[in-house]
Amino acid sequence: MKIISANTNGIRAAASKGFFDWVLSEDLDVICIQETKAHEQQLLDPVFNPAGYFRYFSEAEKKGYSGVAIYTKKKPDKIIHALGFDLADTEGRYVQVDFDDLNLSICSLYLPSGSSSELRQVEKIKFMGIYENILKNQMASGRSFIVCGDWNIVHKEIDIKNFKSNQKSSGCLPEERAWLDQILNQEKWVDAFRVLNQEPDQYTWWSARQKRCWDHNIGWRIDYQIVTPDLKNKIKKVEIYKAQRFSDHAPVLVEYDL
């Protein structure tokens, strides 16, 4: 099963840059998208409804903001659009599809950024606290989970170009990295990409404000596929796709033997 996580920074903008052409050429089974910045009724053009895929959106109440989606070849048995608290559900930050025959759930998550203001950083920390309990419950459920998304946090020094100078930047704060460390160590979730690739300079986001960031690979790895430990040995291939640029993020592709 080939799955990607991709923050498109606007699904319509990404489509205009060939995102869906690439998706079809890769023959992907599941496409998890974050930051769609569109409501589903705005996406009537056939390019947004490729043949052979079911699609499910969670939308922000505010138009042109946030939003997540999942495209899947296999029809799910259940779709979940909410995490159960306002910051997630009014901003369209989560959608989940369940496949009961595989005992598998695949999720598209867009964790908030705190870079715009102190208030948003406070809200981000609150989101993390509530979401940690949800992850604990998912781990205890006995189901397999693949959580694709823009988590807006780097994990370790290896995951960001300028580690020391970003210690006070949202997404690289010590308390944020400690939280992700808790999820991946104490709670036993697995960073799928790092199972097969331990190399430095493997980034998924480059500031669009400075062209030199892309040109000189000054980036952050904040896009993940985080999985339950039973899937660790099922990971067969990982890739950050950079041959084409669809947004300021690069898609993260993982192939699983399911």
Image: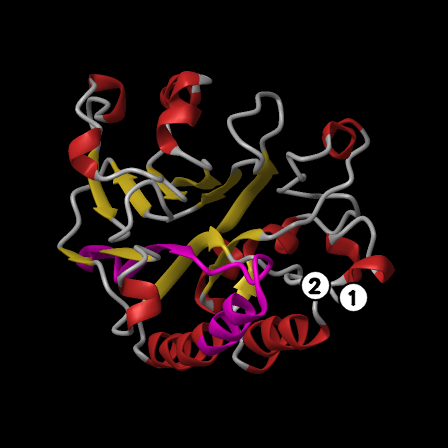
Q: In the image, what residue occupies the spot 55% across and 75% down?
A: 183
The residue labelled by disc 1 is 167
Range covered by the magenta-colored residues: 98-126
Q: Which disc is residue 200 wearing?
A: none
Q: Are marks 1 and 2 in contact (CB under 8 Å)?
A: yes
Q: In the image, what residue occupies the spot 23% across and 45% down?
A: 57
Place of residue 248 in the rendered image (x, y in percent of width and height, measured from the top left): 58, 35
Q: In which quarter of the view is residue 240 placed?
A: top right
The residue labelled by disc 2 is 172
Mark 2 Cα within 10 Å, few/some/many (few <14, many 20+)?
many
Place of residue 93 in the rendered image (x, y in percent of width and height, measured from the top left): 35, 57
Place of residue 92 in the rendered image (x, y in percent of width and height, measured from the top left): 30, 55
Which amino acid lies under the numbered mark 2 shown in the image of this protein?
Cys
Q: In the image, what residue occupies the spot 24% across and 64% down?
A: 82
Q: Earlier in the sequence, mark 1 or mark 2?
A: 1
Image side of residue 189 versus residue 168, left or right:
left
Mark 1 Cα within 10 Å, few/some/many (few <14, many 20+)?
few
Q: Nearer the viewer, residue 254 or 84?
A: 84
Q: Nearer the viewer, residue 37 or 45?
A: 37
Which amino acid lies under the numbered mark 1 shown in the image of this protein?
Gln
SS type, badge 2 = loop
Q: In the image, what residue occupies the spot 72% across and 43% down?
A: 219
